[in-house]
Image (tube, rainbow, N blue to C red):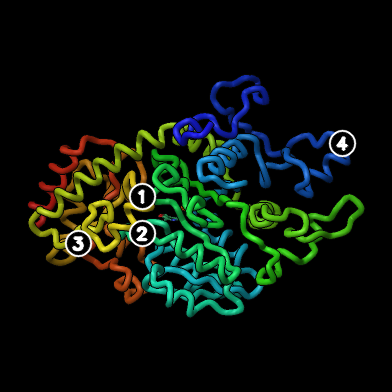
Amino acid sequence: MTDLTTKAIHAGYDRADNARAASVPIYASAAFDLENAARGRALAAGELDGFEYSRVANPTVDVLERRLAALEGGVGAVAVSSGMAAVSYALMCAGERGGRIIASRNLYGASVDALDDFLPGFGIDADVVDDINDLAHVESLIGPDTRAIYTETVANPGTEIADIEALADLAHRHGIALIVDNTVPTPYLLRPIEFGADIVVHSTTKGITGHGNAIGGAIIDAGRFDWANGRFPQFTRPQQVIADADGTPRSFAGAFGREAFIRRVRIKYLRTFGAVQSPFNAYLTLVGLETLPERVSRQVATATKIARHLTHVPHVLKVNYSGLGNTPQYELAAKYLPNGVGQILSFLVDGDVSNVRRILDGTTLFSYVPNIGDARSLIVDPANITHREVPDAVRRAAGVTGNLIRLSIGLEDADDLIADLDQAIAAAY
Ligand SMILES: Cc1ncc(COP(=O)(O)O)c(C=O)c1O
């Protein structure tokens, strides 16, 4: 099974273990029979693959985890209850016990808030940069406490592209990890692990599930990073929860080697904070994944057509869509995203906030919702909705001004969508 389209339908599922059900069953069971004391201990210590309690692992969720790991090219994945749980767990798992994270400024609003305002309260600090591809600047910020570089592979809403391979090389030269949020392109368009990323996070709520019907997230581990290199005390400290058979505590790096990160996410973060994905949501996400290639390829074609059209529409000052090939990031787009940069684009309009409101209210096919990656086309004003927790100056620096409108392109006919936007923009002035 090598092709992504095949993996999206088959990876991680064995009918022989599931009453030969053709479609992945929903295991609505909180707990599972441990069978005997020895097996119970080994399961709890993470030594055996299997199920004990659905806060830590569940067979339906497990299929999703294996499928996402296969799609991204990782050694393991943990599915969680939202994209923000995935972002928070990944950043905390890398940064815990006094670490610093170097992050790009143009992140999703709640991620900016987490790094600027919330995680410092837990002893994890951020060094935020305007341009994550300014490697000299990023390198100058790497200090003894730096644990990771964090960026979105394609930023929301500006679609700026991160130079993953260069960032991974830089990070690895200094013994720190590269963590990326790959929500916007989805693994259909970009697989960051192939370019050296160590940890990939997703809001599966978006393009992966693809129908706007299930909140979820995932963390995928490339399984290559050496967490015992001296920078990450949390991975080398012996811990009771993974004690061996005679009760001697082990460290995550000692017990799990290159899989230490994803094991720690499951055994410490899921077990303690408990933002577990429900089997029902995992099922919806598995159904959505089956059509990921078909959906995203069509959405990219429509998004490109709409972005091109908008560049000629009166009152549209600027269109942000790296896929147009007219941005300074042309070469990055060609290298990392040859099949397109994704379903979202944004555009700046002239006038004031009342014009923006009229455009939002004037569309009839676009739903005004704070989501992306749905089968339906969506419209939103990020400054007021998705990025409202970001301080004004930071938001402006990331290009998210009051006159910016974001679109997430669905599966409707491209010309119908263009006609809807045209009439809404014309009527707004
Ligand atoms: C790039 C990105 N990452 C993470 C998230 C958070 O995901 P969720 O809403 O599933 O928590 C979002 C949500 O919009 C997002 O756009």
Circle 4 residues within 10 Å: few <14, some 14–19, many ≥20: few
Query: What amino acid does circle 4 point to?
Result: Asn
Circle 3 residues within 10 Å: few <14, some 14–19, many ≥20: many
Of pointers 4 and 2, the one earlier in the residue sequence: 4
Circle 2 residues within 10 Å: few <14, some 14–19, many ≥20: many
Find out whether the residues at labels 2 and 3 contact each other: C-beta distance under 8 Å. Answer: no
19 or 143, which is in the foreground? Answer: 143
Residue for badge 2: 161
Please state which of the two labelled residues, at mark 1 or mark 4, is closer to the viewer: 1
Query: What amino acid does circle 3 point to?
Result: Leu
Of pointers 2 and 1, the one earlier in the residue sequence: 2
Residue for badge 4: 36
Count the marks. 4
333 displayed left or right of 365: right
Taking the spot 13% from the left edge, 58% from the top edge, the residue there is 316
282 displayed left or right of 244: left
Give me the C-alpha separation between circle 1 and circle 3: 24 Å
Q: Secondary structure at mark 1?
A: loop
Image spot of residue 365 (x, y percent): 22, 41
Of pointers 1 and 4, the one earlier in the residue sequence: 4
Disc assigned to residue 241? none
Quadrant holding ligand 1? bottom left
Residue for badge 3: 348
The quarter of the image holding the C terminus is: bottom left
Give me the C-alpha separation between circle 4 and circle 3: 63 Å
User: With respect to residue 362, does 2 lie above or below?
Assistant: above
Query: What amino acid does circle 1 point to?
Result: Leu
Of pointers 4 and 3, the one earlier in the residue sequence: 4
Q: Is the CB of mark 2 within 8 Å of ligand 1?
A: no
